[in-house]
Amino acid sequence: MTVVSTDRERGLALCVGDDGRRASVETALVQPVQPGDVLLVHAGTAIASGAAA
Amino acid sequence: MRFVDEFRDAELGRALAAEILSLVEPGRHYKVMEVCGGHTHSIYKYGVDDLLPANVELVHGPGCPVCVIPMGRVDDGIALAHEEGVIFTCFGDMMRVPGSRGSLLEAKAEGADIRMVYSPLDALRIAKQNPDREVVFFAIGFETTAPSTALTLKRARMEHVSNFSCMCSHVTIVPPLRALLESPDLRLDGFIGPGHVSTIVGARPFEFIPADYDKPVVISGFEPLDILQGVQMILRQLAEGRCEVENQYKRVVPYEGNLRALEVMAEVFELRPHFEWRGLGFISHSGLRISEAYAELDSERRFTVPGVRVADPKACQCGEVLKGVIKPWECKVFGTACTPERPIGTCMVSSEGACAAYYNYGRFAREREVV
């Protein structure tokens, strides 16, 4: 999913999937993230980031 | 699409298939286990096995998180769902897994308040929206999913959500692999290592496989070219007489894993002495439970859980499928009594289950042409 915006205080990011679906994603495991980053999301949590890969 | 299109290139796929063909010894039969259900799904969705020589056989492993949940654990979940005032939440796949007296979906139809969620965070949100109800999250999955549950439990504590708890059925991948390697039923030449589990645990936990059992492991991604390259790397190790852990999925998997995830898991979970796996029986130190430090968020301490043990249906051969001993179509009930619409075994329920993958992509052929 691609990060649209971040909520650093709550450790969440609004992300959009390839199908256009939007979801709140827990980002504690891949901090820092910023809009445009591509995240590998599993069960609502980002477990890897494309920027880091 | 970035990170996807470049791994579905047909020309590159044909080139990899040709390289694989050049690496195999005629007359030798190679058995390579793909550990993860996600690999099984991709292999049959994209027809990866059709690109392999006839003497390279892909064998399905125990890495489908839904498939390994035993019937008794489903019965325990249904018992919790019937508790007064409880909202029971779980992933969609779990809803259809048969217990001894039906599935969670059937329990919902009978009146239990069971809701499908996409993530544990959704379950926590339901708890915040329903402060007068107890919300239980049925947590399943390997190390890929466990950090998500752990972070949600930390968040529940931080936000003082006292009506939320978790029935933890998370499992770990290394103990069943060791059990498989000790099994006399199965002769394997190498492993396609689990890509997303390795994102969390890294490559190091798999080093025992080449060290103790002389089998190569290649951690691979899930696109068709990832899997083909994984097979090619295993065959190259065998051809060169090498035996080690290699990482094909470097764009996602760091060798040391995700240290933050490992830390949060170590804080929130502890290993159970034993955990029952469907078809595989009890395996030592293979399941996670909520640690003493987070005891107040453990459904199994908050409620009375029956702890049911139920034998698998005699007709179902999920155990043999999960161990790679038989192919899905060799099961007595595959595609007849057991279908995705009316599954008997878990392997037919989840999209990552080997039986569902075979069934959904029409892979019934028992013979293949030599490439």
Image (tube, rainbow, N blue to C red):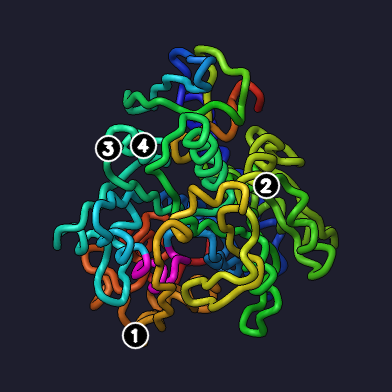
Magenta stretch bounds? B67-76
Secondary-structure class at tag 4: helix
Q: Are marks 1 and 4 on the same chain?
A: yes
Q: Nearer the viewer, mark 3 or mark 2?
A: 3
Q: Residue at x 24, y 78 (%)?
A: B337
Q: Nearer the viewer, mark 1 or mark 4?
A: 4
Measure the alpha-carbon separation of dots 3 and 1: 42 Å
Which chain letter matches label 2?
B
Whether residue B71 is in magenta: the answer is yes
Which chain letter matches label 3?
B
Q: Nearer the viewer, mark 4 or mark 3?
A: 3
Q: Please, what is the three-letter code of the amino acid marked with disc 1? A: Ala
Secondary-structure class at tag 2: helix
Crowding at mark 4 (Cα within 10 Å: few <14, some 14-19, many 20+): some
Q: Residue at x 49, y 14 (%)?
A: A6
Q: Which mark is residue B122?
A: 4
In which quadrant of the rendered view does residue B262 lie? top right
Q: Position of residue B319 (x, y in %)?
A: 48, 77
Secondary-structure class at tag 1: loop
First in sequence, mark 1 or 4: give its number.
4
- Asked if the residue under mark 2 is in contact with the one under mark 3, i.e. CB atoms within 8 Å, the reply is no
Q: Please, what is the three-letter code of the amino acid marked with disc 2? A: Ala
